[in-house]
Amino acid sequence: MRLATALAACAIAGLVLAPAPWLVSDFALSLTLSCLMYVGLAVSWAMFSGATNYLSLATAAFFGIGAYVTAWGHGTLPYAVAVPLGGLAAALFAAAIGAAVLHLRGAYFAVITFGLGELVRHAITYGEKTWARTVGRVISDPPATETVYLVVLALALAAVATAAAVRASRFGLALAGVGSDEERARTLGVNTRLVKTGGFALAAFFAGALGAAVAVRWTYIEPASVFNPFIGFQTVLIAMVGGAHTLAGPIASAVVFSVLTELLRLQFPYAYLIVLGALLILLVLYLPGGLASLLERWKWRQRHA
């Protein structure tokens, strides 16, 4: 997708979706909010991991850091300040960690980034118990639902626009070069360490900002809820099912996945994760390239018809 097309699509989507809080039911608005959150998470994850082939499982850690910036700052920091500050905190944390672990690849990097979320969760739990004498924070007098929705919408659109701009830039080419052949990219003059750290931090910014934005929807914020590994795994699965090497794939997959998850939760409240897991296994086995591969196959057949 070309940059101009992506930016135009973002502008149109913003105009269409912005009036939703005043036009749809509370259930539909909550579902739309979930879709937008996962659009931002999946697109930003694919922007780094889809290009570099580094399987990051740290999304839950960045999301939780952003949420706790809101929790700790609630009552003193304005919502408009807490959201970008949550993104900045996650980005700085990702840059520091990335500089130390981005020399690892494959399963080693995946395990390290997953453990990162657990480490941060336990560290915050220990700190809360030791100094605050509590685990978790109560969110009283949260911003209006309309405000939260518009902020999440803006972040999701910003993530899509940023991913499109990165794909069209030299920075995006450098990320793709790392994913294709890191040694060759290094010999061609790419500072792979700096590129990987920058891409990792940029993806973390959106995860942290979305965590800070959505946190006010919970009455009570605790480490177990905001550092939930399910958030990270679902983000990875959405991006991979849609096609992490594309821009439109994770967006379409986030919408389909969010609606499907909600329907399965209503129809099979005790077994929806089993049904969802079985569907994902079938997709991975028979559609490893994600939903985007269907479009690529159709285009290939059209060209050779």
Image (tube, rainbow, N blue to C red):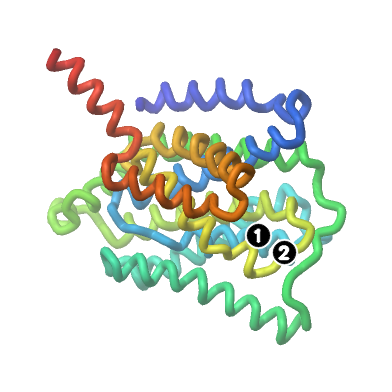
Considering only order in the chain, which callout, 2 or 1, is on the residue closer to the N terminus? 1
Camera sees residue 6: yes
Looking at the picture, how far across and down is residue 222, in whole percent?
69, 68
Which residue is pictured at 25% across the width and 22% down the height? 298
Q: Give the CA distance from mark 1 to mark 2.
A: 8 Å
Amino acid beneath label 1: Ala
Q: Amino acid at mark 2?
A: Ile
Q: Residue at x 23, y 53 (%)?
A: 178
**Mark 1 touching mark 2, by CB under 8 A?**
yes
Pointer 1: what residue?
Answer: 67
Quarter where residue 153 is shown: top right
Residue 37's image quarter? top right
At which x and y percent is residue 267? Answer: 60, 42
Secondary structure of the residue carrying numbered label 1:
helix
Specify whether 160 is left or right of 170: right
- Quadrant position of residue 76: bottom right
Instruction: Classify residue 129 as left or right of residue 8.
Output: right
Using the image, tell me which numbered label, if any, was put on residue 221: 2
Residue 239 in picture, x, y percent from top left: 41, 45
